[in-house]
Image: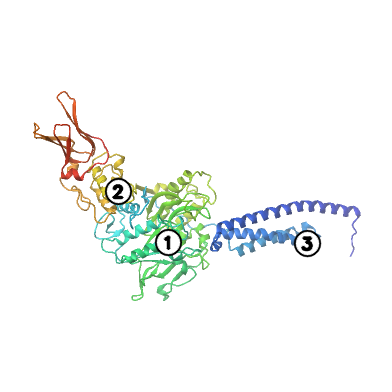
Amino acid sequence: MRCRRHSHAETEHETAETHTFGRHFGFWKRWILTNTLISGIFALAWLVLRSGTRPSRLVYPCQQAALSTATLAFGVPVVAAVIAARRQVIVWARAPLGIAAAALGLVLTSAVGGYLLWADEYRGPRPSPPLGYQAQVYRVTDCPQDPAGDRLVGVDNLLATMGRDGLKLHESATESLISGPGGIISADDVVIIKINYQWDERGGTNVDLLRGLIRRVVDHPDGFTGQVVVCENAQFNSVLGFDRPLNNAQDHGLSPHDVVVAFQTAGHNVSHFDWTSIRNSSVTEYSAGNLADGYVVYPYDGQVQGRVSYPKFQTDSGTYVSLRYGIWSPVSGTYDREGLKFINLPVLKSHHATYGATAAVKHYMGVVTGQLGTNSHSAIRYGIMGALLGEIQLADLNILDAIWINANPFDGPWTSYAGATRKDELVASLDPVALDIWAVKKILIPAFIDNGYSPPWPNPSADPDDPNSDFREYLDNSMFQILSAGYLVTNDFGQITVTARNGGAGDFDGDSDVDSNDYAQFAGCFTGPGGGPIGPECFAADFDADGDVDCDDFEQFQFVWTDPGAPPPLPECDATGVELPGNAASTTTTSLTRAFPNPMSPSTRIEFTIGTPGAVTLRIVDVAGRAVATLVDDSRGVGEHAVVWNGGGGSRAECTSVSSRLRASTPRGGSCS
């Protein structure tokens, strides 16, 4: 073996190269360490700010990602110190080892932080809805702010709008505005109402809306003998017995628990169940002999990169409920799926933490469990919510709460009282995908802009027009799963029909109830079928937006009536709002009828008829056409009227039984003189 001795020149050359590389390496080492540490500091600061005083938030994926970043950042100096300790080794020879160590550190840190990065994309089928499919969306705006007892006029008008279109809340042989054959809820059904109660303040479902909906469910025309169960899985938060002090309601102290207790006190079978309490319990179905509460968890599905799960539980009444198969009878050993109804009651808001926007589809994250190795939160991106819906079937009704929304694209899902935007809207549909894409485009994005934000939208993006946005990614992948399961849904605006109505119809004076004052206004606006046109002062009477105020509108006025008992009847309409024969309102014209006695002795009664409600001016003129007296100069409703003139300039107005009931509120065209 021969050893080659380096010359002095060669040694100086190698030393110079080493020093040159060392200077460059030192610069990049300092740059990497400095910026990595800064990233770590920012990650820790964000983690503290987002988690606040709630350590439970540390399990949230975004917090886990920040924790991973911070752990990696502060771990890099340790690795660098080890490398620096071996500087006598030529750096180029150790560079691959350093890179490998850093990569290994990233993987280990991610594993420690609990944040799993999926490299694969959704690879499942991508079906499209049939060309002939049309989703129906119902929207009411300008909903009154306050509840009227346990009624909410906005939800009443929403249900009535649906009922007019044939989507009835109640299944019954009794036909009415919201009931009839083919309706949603039978008198003996078990009705699950899934709310959002993960967040306090404005982050959860409006409690006044929940109360108003339960009132309508239990007011079944056949007598409600079933039960209503309010449910939620708050993932990593506690629902505190559904009884937090800070709630999304006009009275911040009104909680879902308070609502449940109030209905129980009134004799109704209403309860709540906290799915959060069973999220760590893996169970099998009742048919397998397992009567325990818990979650049924499916095997891993590579298409959605997670495991579908759903709850089964026993209600306060002892009823066994499987969200997939229905009501279980231990006696007969059979399920009744038709007897189980599911109402999805989400709130519309920005979800800057992860997915851009949340509404009806993502609301099912509060149905599945995030535990038991399901990877459900990360798998939302790949359509796991749609896969769940394909298993348990679509909700029987989705009502999207847009009374208060988070309209800040840099915020959400938690929403403070001060950070919320009041929209006073409710939107409903049987199609959760159509509901979501329409509401985000037509309500959430415009609210972003109204609040001073403008595109390009931040990531994660809520942009409904960008198929690559975070919102569209999870919504579209969910749609593919739902369509593959055989249900019809769409994200195509060309396949969405919207029926929009006034959520405050009937409430003329804006005090959030519909009472005798509003009745007087409605009666004054009554035109009969084909009447009108009506002015703005009568828009609250035109429930069906057909340009007149007739018995169809009176039927809905009766439905939204909030005072005890029923409103006074209208002689032109029967109890169900059907026009009666001989309706004077539909044939009457505006005219002077007669003056009696004539000549006056000592006074004259002048009778006149109004065919269209509005401003009326009645003057006495002499033979030269000069005005002698003005007897009437105000607004009058449809019907027969009379005024007495005593010849001395004074007058005493009288009304027949018809005109006393039909009092106009403001001028609306037409006069006699």
Tell me if I can see residue 339 in this picture: no
Q: Amino acid at mark 2?
A: Gly
Q: Which mark is residue 85?
A: 3
Q: Earlier in the sequence, mark 3 or mark 2?
A: 3
User: Which residue in the structure is indicated by mark 2?
Assistant: 506
Number of the front mark, 3 or 2: 2
Q: Which mark is residue 390?
A: 1
Q: In terms of secondary structure, where does tag 3 sit?
A: loop
Number of the front mark, 1 or 3: 3
Q: Where in the figure is residue 396, as x and y percent of width and height? A: 36, 59
Q: Nearer the viewer, residue 339 or 608?
A: 608
In the displayed structure, 474 sits above or below 616; it is: below
State left or right for residue 506 relative to residue 380: left
Q: In terms of secondary structure, where does tag 1 sit?
A: helix
Q: Earlier in the sequence, mark 1 or mark 2?
A: 1
Q: Nearer the viewer, residue 197 or 437?
A: 197
In which quadrant is the N terminus drawn? bottom right
Q: Where in the figure is residue 21, as x and y percent of width and height? A: 79, 52
Tell me if I can see residue 330 in this picture: yes
Q: Residues within 10 Å of mark 2 (few under 14, many from 20)?
A: many
Dividing the picture into quadrants, the one containing residue 602 is top left
Number of the front mark, 1 or 2: 2
Q: Where in the figure is residue 365, as x and y percent of width and height? A: 47, 61
Q: Amino acid at mark 3?
A: Ala
The colour scheme applied to this rendered structure is rainbow
Q: Amino acid at mark 1?
A: Gly
Question: Looking at the image, do the residues carrying marks 3 and 2 touch, with CB atoms under 8 Å apart?
Answer: no
Q: In terms of secondary structure, where does tag 2 sit?
A: loop
What whole-number distance in Å separates the C-alpha atoms at marks 1 and 3?
58 Å
State left or right for residue 412 relative to residue 516: right
Q: Residues within 10 Å of mark 3 (few under 14, many from 20)?
A: few
